[in-house]
Image: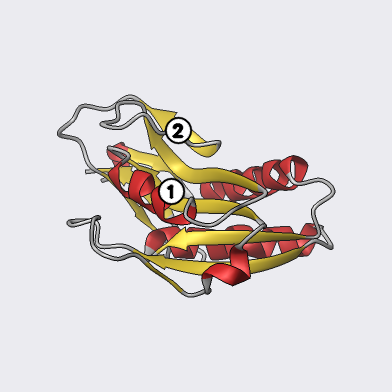
């Protein structure tokens, strides 16, 4: 696995900090940001971004967990916040890896059912070949991989890592 490491813990922390600053720069003048992380790793990534934003800014943040069935994205998507809690807000949808774009595409569709001030996406790893025309507004790193490659991100306290399987 050591030969297949994409991002070390130190690099991941640097990318998270940079993404947090970019989010703040895009949201100057806002009093609140909703950070919606796709369940499991996307939500862990969103929590890390929120922690940095809270340490460097006075802006209020709301964390939202987005539960989506990645194998069947047409199933109902659930969020930890009610729609009225993020309506007319600036919302950042967060996931760890943007692979085919399917998960992000269906999650975007869910949030577009409510009026938002601004809607952006953030990912730690962006794969350059996608099935859908969706892009990440904020990304840690972009990679061109084969369709058969799998990228894994593990958030383990102070020992996070991203690698190619």
Find disc 2 in the rendering and name its residue. 135
- Residue toward you, 68 or 86: 86
Find disc 1 in the rendering and name its residue. 108
- Image coordinates for residue 90, horizontal then vertical, percent: 66, 53
Q: Nearer the viewer, mark 1 or mark 2?
A: 1
Label 1 or label 2, whichever comes before in sequence order: 1
Q: How is the image coloured?
A: secondary structure
Q: Is residue 159 visible?
A: no
Task: Name the residue at 57% across, 43% down.
Answer: 120
- Image coordinates for residue 33, horizontal then vertical, percent: 69, 58
- The secondary element bearing badge 2 is classed as loop
Image quarter where the C terminus lies is top left
Task: Name the residue at 40% across, 49% down.
Answer: 109
- Crowding around mark 2 (Cα neighbors within 10 Å: few <14, some 14 to 19, many 20+) is some
- Image coordinates for residue 6, horizontal then vertical, percent: 39, 39
- The secondary element bearing badge 1 is classed as helix
Task: Name the residue at 21% across, 27% down.
Answer: 146
- Residue toward you, 63 or 106: 106
Q: Which mark is residue 128?
A: none
């Amino acid at each position: 696995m050591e030969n297949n490491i994409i991002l070390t813990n130190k690099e991941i922390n640097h990318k998270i900090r940079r993404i947090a600053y970019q989010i703040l720069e895009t949201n100057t003048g806002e009093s609140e940001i909703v950070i919606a992380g796709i369940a499991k790793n996307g939500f862990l990534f969103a929590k890390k971004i929120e922690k940095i934003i809270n340490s460097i800014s006075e802006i209020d943040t709301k964390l939202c967990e987005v539960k989506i069935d990645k194998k069947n994205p047409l199933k109902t998507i659930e969020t930890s916040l009610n729609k009225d809690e993020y309506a007319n807000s600036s919302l950042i949808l967060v996931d760890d890896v943007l692979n085919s774009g399917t998960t992000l595409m269906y999650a975007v569709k869910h949030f577009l059912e409510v009026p938002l001030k601004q809607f952006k996406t953030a990912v730690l790893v962006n794969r350059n070949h996608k099935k859908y025309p969706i892009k990440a507004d904020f990304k840690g790193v972009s990679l061109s991989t084969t369709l058969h490659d799998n990228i894994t991100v593990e958030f383990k306290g102070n020992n996070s890592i991203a690698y190619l399987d």
